Image (cartoon, rainbow, N blue to C red):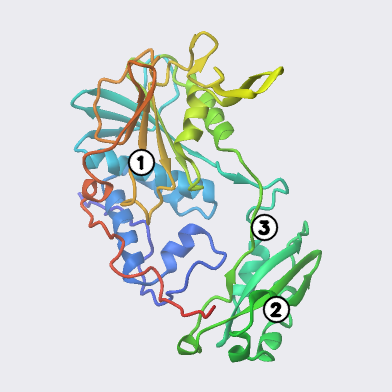
Amino acid sequence: MTIVPQPKVFDDFVRTDPRPANGEDSFSFLNRVASPYWQRVRDFIEAAFAEYPRDDAADIRARFRDRRWPEHVGAWWELYLHALFRAFGFSVEVHPALDGTTARPDFRVWTPGGVLLVEARYVAAGLVSSEQRVGRDDWIIAPLNDLTHPDFMVSIQIHQRGAPQPRRTAVTSGVLEWLDGLDADALAEQSFTDLPRFQGCAGDWRFELQPIAVSRKARGRQRRLVGMGPATGGYDNTVSALRRALKEKARRYGRPSDPLILAVLTTSGFTDTEDVVDALFGSQAVQFDPGRPHDATMIRRRDGFWIAGAGYRGTRISAVLIGDAILPWSVTTRLPRLWVNPGAANPMGAQLDLPTARIDDEGKLALAEAEISAARRFGLNEEWPGPGPPFAREGISG
C-alpha cells in the first residue's frame, strides 16, 4: 500500500522577498517572507503540524492558510496547544466524542494526574474603536507602502475616514513628487513640528503626511514608506469579551466526567492579570458614604463569571487557560497562565508546569510561575526565532 505523505503547511518555493508585512494577511506574509528568522518560525509550525493527527490535519491546515484573521489565528492556537501538550509528553486526542452530547471539545489530554478536556477559543479582545475603523486604515497605509523613496519615510495622520475603500492610485497620487522636492539633509535638522506637510485626498478619506529623513548611510535602500502612525483610539473590551466566551462554552458539553479547561487566546498584548480577575471573580468598584466622600474604598463586585451573589457559578469549567499574544513568532516569550476555578464541580487533579493563578486558603489570589521556560519546554533557544533581527535594520535620523 502506498502511503501518501502529509502535505506541508507552507508552499515549497525559493523565497526572495524579505520585506515586512505590507497590508497582507498573516498567512500570506509568513508564506512569503524570506530570512533565517522567519524560516525558523515556519520550521516550528511545520514540526507542530507533522505531529497533528492525520485525520484532522486537512482541516487545521486549511484554516491556518485562511486569509481571514479569526480562522487563521484560531487554527494557530489549536496547533500551539496540541504542540504544548505533546511537549509535556502527554497523549492528545483531537475532537473526542463525549457521552450524552454530540458536541466535541478540541482535545482530550491524558496526564499522569488525570484526563483533561480542552476547548480552544480565540477572543478578539483589546482596543476597540468607537468608529469601528480597526483594519480599514490599511486601505491608506498599504498603497503608500507600495511606494519607496531613497531619502525619506513618512509619518501619517488620518483626519477623515470614508466608508468605501479608495482607489490605490488616488492614495499615492503626488506623494513621491512631493518627497522629490524636499532636502533630506536640511529637514533632518528641523523639529518635527516644523516639518512640511502633504495633504492627501482619496475619495472620502483625508490624510496628512510628514517626511522622516533617512540617515545618510541608510539612504538608497528599499524600505516601506510609512514609518510612523496612525494612532488608534478606543476602549478596552477584554473583560466583556472573556466573559462572553466563557458563557458561550459553559453549558456546551453538559456535565462531562472529566475536568474541562477553556483555553483562550487574546492577541492584543493588553490582557493583564486584573482583566482576568475582573472577568472571573468580579469587577472593581468604588464604595463610599455620600456624607464622607473622602473615605472611599475599593471593593470587588460579585459579578464575575465564577463568583456571583453569595456563591459560585460557572462551575462546569474547571480552569481557564489564558494565552496573551502567543503567536507563531513569540512562542518562547511566555507560556499561557492557568486560572483554577475555586468552585469547580469537577476539580483538576492534573498538575501542569504552567504559570498558574488560584485562590489560596485565605481567599487571596496566588500567582506561581512555571519551573521550565517556554523556550526550554519546546526545545528552542531563548533568543528564538533569532539570532538576528526579523528584518534588515534601517537607519532613520531623528
Q: Residue 112: which quarter of the image? A: top left
| Residue 214 in view, yes or no | yes
Which residue is label 1 attached to? Answer: 56
180 and 87: which one is in front?
Answer: 180
Compare marks 2 and 1 and give the one earlier in the sequence: 1
Question: Is the C-beta separation of discs 3 and 1 under 8 Å?
Answer: no
Q: Residue shown at 21%/23% (left/top)?
A: 113
State the image quarter where residue 261 is shown.
Answer: top left
* Amino acid on which the number 2 mark rests in the picture: Asp
At a point 60% along the width and 89% down the height, the residue shown is 184
User: What x and y, as percent, mark residue 287?
Assistant: 62, 20
Disc number for residue 194: 2
Residue farthest top in this picture: 310
Q: Earlier in the sequence, mark 3 or mark 2?
A: 3
Which element type, helix, strand or loop, lies under badge 1?
Answer: helix
Residue annotated with mark 3 = 136
Label 3–label 2 contact, CB within 8 A: no
**Residue type, numbered disc 3:** Arg
Quarter containing the C terminus: bottom right
In the image, residue 311 above or below residue 87: above
Q: How many marks?
A: 3
Per the model, the C-alpha gap separating discs 3 and 2 is 29 Å
Which tag is nearer the camera, tag 3 or tag 1? Answer: 3
The answer to whether 322 appears left or right of 49 in the picture is right
Q: Residue at x 54, y 75 (%)?
A: 224
**Where, by quadrant of the figure, is residue 90 drawn?**
top left
- Mark 1 crowdedness (10 Å alpha carbons): few <14, some 14-19, many ≥20: few
Question: Distance of mark 2 from mark 1, alpha carbons?
Answer: 59 Å
Using the image, determine if residue 390 lies above or below residue 372.
below
